[in-house]
């Protein structure tokens, strides 16, 4: 239950639930619970619930949930209270009590919107001007999750571009120019087996099963060998995305960028 979008509490619940693989877990989200009336209506329907996790800054709503849990047969946990209390103890400041403050339309928000527009409008864009505007360039062979990772980084406010490595084709001069201008780049690779599986699935969707070289493991191995040589030649850090989610790859990219700033 949340007084805003519920992204925070849902992410926390799903992260914990993923550790209990043998437990059947059904998560129901109730966002934008900002009135006492709405809270009472929801609480009245919690009869078959085992656990209520909530992020609400309204203390009256929080108290309602806690009181109802004592007679409703379920546990209630406030996700934010321990962190909120720790912040208060730093210098005695008090929280505003205003829900959804993290979603305000401020400079950071506008930068995220700009980064998302950049990623979507210029996917595989290779002009010198475009690449020099990037905060990071992801480079890799086909199906190494360059585009979705760029979009996820954009959601985090990072302007990310991507440059594909195509067999028997030179890397565009614009990419080399961007490197020389100081734009950081990161190489992405994956195992030949994984890439073969993804590419075979891709060919089936596109209806082009005759493009066997694209999905052959031995041809992919040659692609990856060339890619590694390219990364080494230009001194690029490399991330193996074989067992990484897009979120994990994006976090690794951010870690590389952070090290550059130290």
Image (cartoon, grey):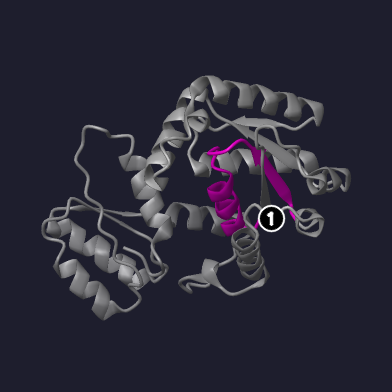
Quadrant containing the N terminus in the rendered view: bottom left
Percent of width and height locating residue 45: 14, 66
Question: For residue 201, which quarter of the picture?
Answer: top left
Percent of width and height locating residue 161: 68, 51
Camera-nearest residue between 160 and 128? 128
Residue 104 on the magenta span: no
Looking at the image, is 60 positioned above or below residue 163?
A: below
| Mark 1, secondary structure of its residue | loop
**What residue is shown with label 1?**
125
Looking at the image, is 36 positioned above or below residue 237?
A: below
Q: Residue at x 49, y 25 (%)?
A: 216
Residue 141 on the magenta span: yes
Residue range of the region highlighted in magenta in the rendering: 134-158
Quadrant containing the C terminus in the rendered view: top right
Looking at the image, is 156 positioned above or below residue 169?
A: below
Position of 234 with respect to 196 (left or right) is right
Looking at the image, is 192 positioned above or below residue 55?
A: above
Q: Residue at x 40, y 66 (%)?
A: 5
Residue 90 shows in this picture: yes
Mark 1 crowdedness (10 Å alpha carbons): few <14, some 14-19, many ≥20: some
Residue 243 shows in this picture: no
Camera-nearest residue between 182 and 87? 182
């Amino acid at each position: 239950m949340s007084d805003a979008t519920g992204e925070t509490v849902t992410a926390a619940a799903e992260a914990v639930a993923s550790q209990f693989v043998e437990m059947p877990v059904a998560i129901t989200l109730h966002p934008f619970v900002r009135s006492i009336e709405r809270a009472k209506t929801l609480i009245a329907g919690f009869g078959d619930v085992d656990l209520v996790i909530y992020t609400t800054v309204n203390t009256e709503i929080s108290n309602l949930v806690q009181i109802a849990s004592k007679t409703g047969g379920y546990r209630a946990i406030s996700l934010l209270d321990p962190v909120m209390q720790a912040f208060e103890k730093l210098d005695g400041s008090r929280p505003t009590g205003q829900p959804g403050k993290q979603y305000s339309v401020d400079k950071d928000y506008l930068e995220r919107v700009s980064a998302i527009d950049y990623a979507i409008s210029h996917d595989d864009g290779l002009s010198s001007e475009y690449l020099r505007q990037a905060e990071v360039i992801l480079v890799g062979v086909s199906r190494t999750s360059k585009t979705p990772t760029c979009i996820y980084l954009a959601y985090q406010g990072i302007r990310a571009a991507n440059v594909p490595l195509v067999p028997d084709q030179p890397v565009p001069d614009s990419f080399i120019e961007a490197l020389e201008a100081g734009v950081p780049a990161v190489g992405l690779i994956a195992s030949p087996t994984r890439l073969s599986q993804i590419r075979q699935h891709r060919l089936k969707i596109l209806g082009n099963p005759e493009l066997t070289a694209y999905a052959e493991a031995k041809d992919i191995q040659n692609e990856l060998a060339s890619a590694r040589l390219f990364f080494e030649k230009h001194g690029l850090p490399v991330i193996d995305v074989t067992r990484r989610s897009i979120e994990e790859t994006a976090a690794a990219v951010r870690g590389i960028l952070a090290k550059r700033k130290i």
